[in-house]
Image: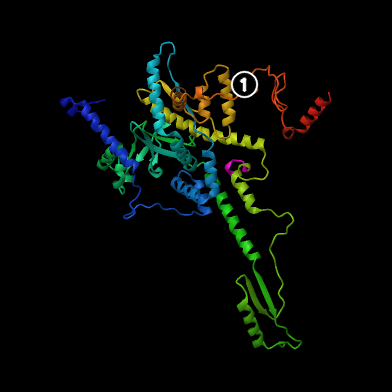
Amino acid sequence: MIKTNEQKKSGNDSKGNVEGIIGISERFALLNRLITRDVNNNTNSPTFSLYTKDEISTYLSDPYRYEKQLRKAVTYIYGASSHFRRLIKYFVGLSDLAFVVSPYKIDPKSANPKSISRNYRKVLNAMSAMNVRTQFPKILTVCLREDVFYGTMWITNDNITIQQLPSDYCTISTIEGNVPNVTFDFSYFDSRSSILEFYPAEFNTKYSAYLKNRTGMRWQELDCPNSFAIKCNNDIMDYAIPPFAGILREVYDLEDYKKLKLTKTAIENYAMLVMTLGIDEDGNWTMDFDKAKEFWRNLDRVLPEEVGSVLSPMPISKISFEKSNTGDTDTISEAEQNLFTAAGVSSLLFNNSKASANALQLSIKADQAITYEIVKSIEDAVNRYIQAQSYGKNFRVTFLDCSPYNRKELGDQYLKACQFGLPFISMYAATQGMNQSEVDCMNFLENDVLGLTDRFVPLQSSSTQSGSVSHMDGNGATEEGGAPTKDIDDLTDSGEQSREDSDDW
């Protein structure tokens, strides 16, 4: 730690440290009770607008120029379209964010086990403080929706909270340790000075520098590793383009088809009654015209809104624009399939009647690779922070390519490797939803504290006894041992035939 002049003069370093810790704790307490808006004096309310399909096409033609408009468009559609939101959530759910902490750049022969164990626990505590399974899905959601997540961390001894920064006032200008750094536009606080206290102290210092030089210090890079950016399309660093911006037109098409179907249904439910007033050969009304109008008015008054009426001196023929039933298709269902096809995912995932298990699994694996690429970027940011700490320079965090769809398959692979003596116990536990700190703690609790392994004794059965089983009942194992006989309801046709053949023999 670098001492200040006052500390050097007084020699009271501990007091200065305590004051610093209290200051951080107070600011962190403010973050825990962050006031997002003053409802009695609300001057900064979010604004959204439904862009037209032509405007979306214009934005997509020049995504660098219309970066902010595209971001606002997808944010609006995310809230307004259940199909678009479900698509984003589907990709977010393709990762369990299971991770393991492993040694990094050490020599097992010369390493000090006590030092390694002590620092290993500190790394596990830091990962627990991050609340990976609650905070990181939010990062994935923003990346898949807007392309870039800009964040900064509030760090205390017990918690690490990631605060999202306003995307419209952030950009990427440098990459350090394979992680993009955040360059922030401090003019953001010109009209929002009241919320400056809800940002880390670094923002206050750099905003003061901006006030002294508004031109040269408007854009300033935030300190790493506490601040970072995670980008989905990391092969395009000059600007942000939402990964699914290309399907915005398909979302609009789906809404248009719904409106057309609603209009078509309303028209088909509408009826019209025609009252014909005859004309004789000489061109005279066959009925008094005034009486005919009176009859027509009486009829029109009692008809419901869906039924119209008209008084006509000539017959009226119906002209219909309905499609014939032959070869007619459901345009909404077709539009939904086009939407997911344009997104690059299988429509089998979203309530399709032609589901194929094998094709579905292959499609999910291809989609999972997209999410895992973002997870690996998060892994780089986490490792940059961990390895910047004194206790974490010899450790790294690895996120596994695990999801609810391949958890069993991946777990079986790690379990088989463990059975052959390979060090994959932590990986297997992670795929089952238990991180390394929980493995140690639960093992200590169940074995040493509660003694559950001594209290719970498996019931005796053919699977816990030797093969030389003596007499069992008719539904149990035979004298030679083996599995119990299955009930007749549990047998297949071939199994029943095999039993009958064995009985005849």
Residue 501 percent location from the top left of the image: 82, 26
- In the displayed structure, would residue 311 be above or below residue 240? below
Residue 38 percent location from the top left of the image: 33, 52
Q: Quadrant of residue 463?
A: top right
In this rendering, does residue 186 appear at all? yes
What is the span of residues highlighted in magenta in the rendered image? 342-347
- In the displayed structure, would residue 486 be above or below residue 247? above
Tell me the element at label 1: loop
**Left or right of residue 504, residue 168 in this image:** left
* Image quarter of the C terminus: top right
What is the count of numbered marks? 1
Is 345 a magenta residue? yes
**How is the model colour-coded?**
rainbow
In the rendered image, the residue lying farthest to the top is 109
* Image quarter of the N terminus: top left
Which residue is painted at 35% across and 39% down in the image? Answer: 184
**Which three-letter amino acid code belongs to the residue tagged 1?**
Thr
Is 145 a magenta residue? no
In the rendered image, the residue lying farthest to the right is 504
Q: Pointer 1: residues within 10 angstroms few (<14), some, or many (20+)?
A: few
Residue 490 percent location from the top left of the image: 72, 33
**Left or right of residue 71, residue 31 in this image:** left
- In the displayed structure, would residue 255 be above or below residue 312? above
Residue 270 percent location from the top left of the image: 64, 68
Of the pair 316 and 240, the residue shown nearer to us: 316
In this rendering, does residue 174 appear at all? no
Q: Which residue is mark 1?
A: 464
- In the displayed structure, would residue 97 be above or below residue 75? above
